[in-house]
Amino acid sequence: MNVKNTTKLTRLKCFKAFLVRYFDNGWLTNKFWRSENIKVDTEIKVGATDEDVNLLLSVLDYIKFLDLRNATAVLLMYRCGLRIGTIARMNEKQIDFVYQRLQLDGEVMKNHNGSILHVDEQMLYLLQIIVK
């Protein structure tokens, strides 16, 4: 097939859905297609650079609370590798100001595994302003 990899995966998904309907109607006796997959090369996304993050942070007005909150979220994503959903579910008890770390339990993480992440003083200062 001379099509993009995403098209191949979409076609396979649609065909499998079609076969599920046949199985549900009793026209097929086993789900042989469950073990069939197409291996395709996936494109690796280029991450943000320091310049990209600095440019984004330079347009924010830190006097406004929302911009300060957004800058803190951007830095948490960039420096700690956190997802935006994880940051949104974080609460104050997960920030350890004494040992300079984030103690994230499974309820805020996507994979439900806890994690301890060390953060620098600047990040702690921003988190302290946001929390209080």
Image (cartoon, helix red, strand yellow):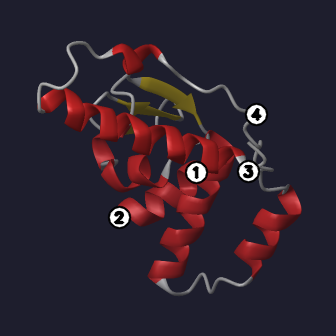
Nearest to the eye among marks 4 and 2: give it: 4
Checking the image for residue 128, the label placed there is none
* Distance CA(mark 1)–CA(mark 3): 38 Å
Q: Which residue is mark 1?
A: 76
Checking the image for residue 3, the label placed there is 3
Q: Provide the secondary structure element on which disc 4 rests.
A: loop
Q: Amino acid at mark 2?
A: Lys
**Tag 1–tag 4 contact (CB < 8 Å):** no
Label 1 environment density (alpha carbons within 10 Å; few <14, some 14–19, many ≥20): some
Label 2 environment density (alpha carbons within 10 Å; few <14, some 14–19, many ≥20): few
Residue 99 spot, x, y in % from top left: 50, 29
Label 3 environment density (alpha carbons within 10 Å; few <14, some 14–19, many ≥20): few
Q: Provide the secondary structure element on which disc 2 rests.
A: loop
* Distance CA(mark 1)–CA(mark 4): 30 Å
Q: Amino acid at mark 4?
A: Asp
| 113 relative to 48 in the view: left or right | left
* Distance CA(mark 2)–CA(mark 3): 53 Å
Residue visible at 31% across and 28% down in the picture: 106
In the rendered view, tell whether residue 2 sits above or below residue 49.
above
Q: Taking the image as drawn, is residue 96 in sight?
A: no
In the rendered view, tell whether residue 27 sits above or below residue 57.
above
Residue visible at 36% across and 60% down in the picture: 131
Residue visible at 66% across and 25% down in the picture: 39
Closer to us: 16 or 89: 16
Nearest to the eye among marks 4 and 3: give it: 3
Q: Amino acid at mark 1?
A: Leu
User: In terms of sequence position, does the residue under pointer 1 or pointer 3 come before the other?
Assistant: 3
Q: Which residue is mark 4?
A: 41
